[in-house]
Amino acid sequence: MIIQLKNGKLYDPAHGVDGVVRDLYIRDGRIVAQPNSNEKIDQVFDLSGKIVMAGAIDMHSHIGGGKVNIARMMLPEFQIKEYQETRQYTEPEAHICTPSCSHDAVPNTNQTGFRYIEMGYTAAFEPAILPINARQAHLEMGDTPMIDKGGYAMLGNDDYFLRLLSSKAEQKVINDYVAWTLHATQAIGIKVVNPGGISAFKFNQRRLDLDENHSFYQVSPREILKSLSTAVHQLGIAKPLHVHCNNLGAAGNFQTTLDTMGASEGVPMHLTHIQFHSYGAEGDKKFSSAAAQISEALNKHQHITADVGQILFGQTVTASGDSMMQQLNAQYANPKKSVIMDIECDAGCGVVPFKYRDQNYVNALQWAIGLEIFLSVEDPWRIFLTTDHPNGAPFTSYPHLIRLLMDKSFRNEAFAKLNLDAQAMSNLTSLDREYSLYEIAVMTRAGAAKLIGLNDRGHLGAGAAADITIYTDQPDREAMFAKPDYVFKDGELVVRDCKVVKVVWGKTHTAKPAFDIGVEQGLKAYFNQYHTIQLDNFKISNDEIADDGRGGIIIHST
Ligand SMILES: [Zn+2]
């Protein structure tokens, strides 16, 4: 079976293709070179006047694992409308996107998959898998239809690692533990949240700065970052260490963020939701934008990548592994409820519902700071489009965010409605940049695939998986990106006119670097002494990811 996509205008940054009209061919789920003239074309789509990109990849979105489910349980009022809509999906053909579609902060698994694919996203990566809770995370992701999944396993606040570091274990031992964790949790990357801080919180420290020591282990966040980023690098894992810096959300935290960029000593690191880490402490309200300093540093440090974590106004829920900072944020909960929890004394999270308001000084400035960073970072290959779903806003608001980046007058109109004090503290209207379609394709496709190490995704070259999204070119970029005409997943037409026409299940992307299995000796003894679960039950087998024809694993070479 050969499908021809005819006369579409291609944006394929991995191959430098910027708006070139060209045909694509699909065979057996892959993009292939033009077939011989004697081969039969089974189906032709005329894409004249349409825009063709690879399926979009969300490199940071909380779609699985304990936090999201806690948020779902804690906020049943968000779910009622969703449940009514989900029922329509028993007959997928019956669902038509309407303006009344909920843009809820905590969609259930079904909604997550359908909403992503309807926007042309074909993969999303859960950035905070607690190793102890990885099975739950994979069960949720496995129940999310339509898209590919993957996750980053959290290390750096776990007792085992902190013991290794404080006892000055060799880097090789750390590397083996990191690799073992990737295998055991079926993850594709490693994340550290508030390095050392989440653990320090349990020893009654309420802040931990980059060069401050954890009171019990006597190690600093800087040492943790050095050790983990080196391990990821030496193991050959494509995805650089994913770093949620210390001092999330605190006024004046930009200095910590700048210092963190130097902590890996030139080894690649990714700083996530950097908007939340770009705050100064200037002005009457002691809260200001440090987007200029952060962007300048990002432009300079080629080994650092970042995603923004843009906030957008409205109701959402924040869910973070950073229980230290979420405990501070709980006072701002809206509605007034929150959860701070911990598993096995080893990893935890905080879930706090929140409503961002454009008349609130801090919220309005947060909105502007995110956009200032987007517009000031020069290289779209090193900055990524995220809202840290659901922390800054639900992922369903991406089309709106894309329009803010691509349309200066739309952005300035929105800015003019903000809290006036916040307007006075932002230089946003002096930034004239408008993102091009090519740059959007870099940020949401080619760049994301390259960062995570998905060699056969995020591009339209021969051999790539046929994850393809087709839009009608419209001046209103929000309308355009909200409703693709067609989405192909692994070569199958799954969305037509913003309507799911076929349900598929996607796969789980993992990385499995080689390591010395001898590391299990120490781990086994540790599990027997301290954990309620045995080591063999902690590890997730390949069979657990594939179930009843759903799912399956893709292992990316390291
Ligand atoms: Zn996040």
Image (cartoon, rainbow, N blue to C red):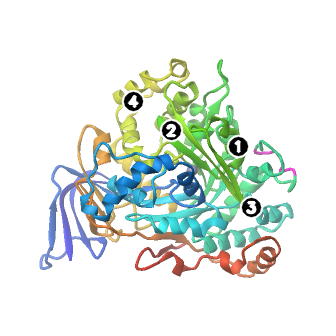
Marks 3 and 1, the one that precedes in the sequence: 1
Q: Is residue 183 visible?
A: yes
Give the residue drawn at x 62%, y 50%: 320
Q: Which residues are magenta?
A: 210-215
Marks 1 and 4, the one that precedes in the sequence: 1
Q: Give the answer, above or below, for where 435 lies relative to 12.
A: above
**CA–CA distance in space, label 2 to label 1:** 20 Å
Q: Residue 489 occupies which quadrant of the picture?
A: bottom left
* Tag 1 residue: 327
Give the residue drawn at x 79%, y 63%: 159
Q: Nearer the viewer, residue 525 or 259?
A: 525
Q: Is residue 349 left or right of residue 508?
A: right
**CA–CA distance in space, label 1 to label 4:** 33 Å
Q: Identify residue type, mark 2.
A: Ile
Q: Give the answer, above or below, for where 367 lies relative to 37.
A: above
* Tag 4 residue: 411
Q: Position of residue 404 (x, y in %)?
A: 39, 35
Marks 2 and 4: CB-CB under 8 Å?
no
Nearer the observer, disc 2 or disc 3? Answer: 3
**CA–CA distance in space, label 3 to label 4:** 43 Å
Marks 3 and 4: CB-CB under 8 Å?
no
